[in-house]
Image (tube, rainbow, N blue to C red):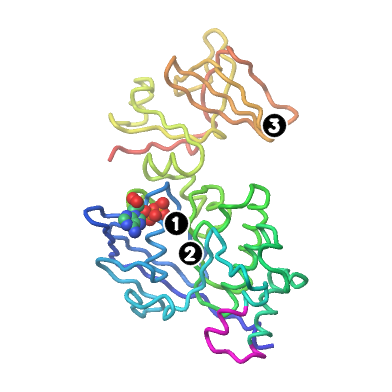
């Protein structure tokens, strides 16, 4: 059947895109290339400009300056319809009085496909999201996850080259969310489409994305593959936003350690909790070449890991995660510990500025 034909994902370029609301610059000169078939996430705190960026790509907001290109064509000022992109929103936006089948056929009817073709293509998309036995139901007769699968089917039924998703899983509980993340990824791979995905959920972004752009105040703080951004954050914001992080200011580190590492005032030492190694502090022995020592302030049992909060003094703590293995060495509240790491690559010095 022709409907199963695979279209290639579109190539997207943001060139110097700026958007203002009144005096406020909410998207500030963004330059960005998204490759065909890429799963690309915009990740950042609330108000950082993610949705505005996506809405400019969708055609629901117009940039004040710059260009948005889709496969080399300037689409900056086209209407949403002319852009022909698929869209999935958090609230599903299904038509409540239409059945699943009618909802999924809708974009095809708008595009003037024949009755037979509408039906065949809609059935293909409904099969794709495994809802064939629910085709006659109304949205209100479906679970949240099923409703979102209808929205997905409706977004891909006309074979768009790009699908935009704005917090599509925000309304689902944690387990279902994870399952839907896998389903969306599978669908994206199967259809080979470009996906631009907005989320404030860092784990979701890491799980799903080929690349992530971390946004803050309308700018991209860092852009890269999840592992790259996680392991080598470029600045304190990126380090703190993606995953758990210990960020130690210069003043917290022993003088000889600072000198050895060539650290300047204003630099930070960055280490993920899972890379922190703790050892009992006994007499003169310290396994930490950082010179850092502390006292266990809290022990959180989180199932697969145990998280220690270690107070360096009354004010400042760092966190260490320990996998919950059978041979794990454990510490109790009040224990004094030396704080270190296995190798130099476990830490990063984040330079000031
Ligand atoms: P995010 O998706 O990262 O939460 P948004 O793109 O929704 O961020 O918003 C970025 C900033 O732009 C916020 O400060 C928000 O209040 C502002 N903003 C968004 N839409 C409008 C609008 N239509 N009018 C005025 N300000 C807006």
Residue underneath mark 2: 196
| Residue 107 locus on image (x, y percent) | 55, 79
Please state if 296 lies on the left or on the right of 123 as rendered: left
Q: Mark 3 or mark 2: which comes first in sequence? A: 2
| Residue 248 locus on image (x, y percent) | 40, 28
Numbered label attached to residue 119: none
Q: Are marks 1 and 2 in contact (CB under 8 Å)?
A: yes
Q: Residue at x 48, y 62 (%)?
A: 40
Ligand 1 shown in quarter: bottom left
Assess disc 1: are there few (<14), some (14-19) or many (≥20) residues with their C-alpha within 10 Å of its C-alpha.
Answer: many
| Residue at disc 2, CB closer than 8 Å to ligand 1 | no
The stretch of residues the image draws in magenta is: 105-117
Residue underneath mark 3: 324
Under tag 3, what secondary structure?
loop
Q: Residue at x 64, y 72 (%)?
A: 190
Quadrant position of the N terminus in the picture: bottom right
Q: Which residue reaches farthest right?
A: 133
Q: Is residue 324 magenta?
A: no
Nearer to me, 177 or 246? 177
| Residue at disc 1, CB closer than 8 Å to ligand 1 | yes
| Residue 73 locus on image (x, y percent) | 36, 80
Q: Mark 1 or mark 3: which comes first in sequence? A: 1
Under tag 2, what secondary structure?
strand
Q: Residue at x 57, y 23 (%)?
A: 278
Q: Is residue 110 magenta?
A: yes
Please state if 34 lies on the left or on the right of 1 as rendered: left
Residue 49 can be seen in this image: no
Residue underneath mark 1: 42
């Amino acid at each position: 059947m022709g409907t199963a034909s695979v279209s290639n994902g579109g190539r997207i370029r943001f060139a110097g895109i700026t958007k203002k609301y009144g005096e406020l610059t909410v998207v500030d000169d963004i330059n960005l290339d998204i490759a065909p078939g890429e799963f690309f996430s915009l990740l950042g705190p609330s108000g950082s400009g993610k949705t505005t960026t996506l809405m400019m790509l969708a055609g629901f907001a117009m940039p004040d300056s710059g260009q948005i290109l889709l496969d080399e064509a300037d689409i900056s000022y086209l209407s949403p319809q002319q852009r022909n992109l698929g869209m999935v929103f958090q609230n599903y936006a299904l038509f409540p009085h239409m059945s699943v089948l009618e909802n999924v056929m809708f974009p095809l009817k708008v595009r003037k496909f024949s009755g037979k073709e509408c039906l065949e293509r809609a059935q293909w998309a409904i099969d794709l999201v495994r809802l064939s036995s629910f085709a006659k139901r109304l949205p209100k007769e479906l679970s949240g996850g099923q409703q979102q699968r209808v929205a997905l089917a409706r977004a891909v039924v006309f074979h768009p080259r790009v699908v935009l998703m704005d917090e599509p899983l925000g309304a689902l509980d944690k387990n279902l969310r994870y399952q839907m993340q896998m389903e969306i990824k599978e669908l994206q791979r199967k259809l080979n489409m470009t996906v631009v995905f907005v989320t404030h959920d860092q784990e979701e972004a890491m799980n799903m994305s080929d690349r992530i752009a971390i946004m803050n105040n309308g700018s991209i703080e860092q852009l890269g593959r999840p592992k790259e951004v996680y392991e080598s954050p470029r600045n304190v914001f990126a380090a703190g936003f993606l995953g758990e992080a210990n960020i130690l200011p210069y003043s917290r580190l022993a003088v000889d350690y600072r000198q050895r590492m060539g650290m300047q005032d204003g630099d930070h030492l960055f280490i993920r909790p899972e890379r922190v190694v703790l050892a009992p502090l006994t007499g003169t022995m310290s396994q930490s070449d950082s010179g850092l020592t502390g006292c266990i302030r809290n022990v959180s049992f989180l199932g697969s890991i145990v998280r220690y909060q270690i107070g360096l003094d009354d004010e400042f703590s760092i966190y260490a995660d320990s996998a919950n293995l059978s041979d794990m060495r454990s510490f109790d509240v009040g224990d004094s510990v030396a704080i270190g790491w296995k190798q130099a690559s476990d830490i990063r010095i984040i330079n000031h500025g």
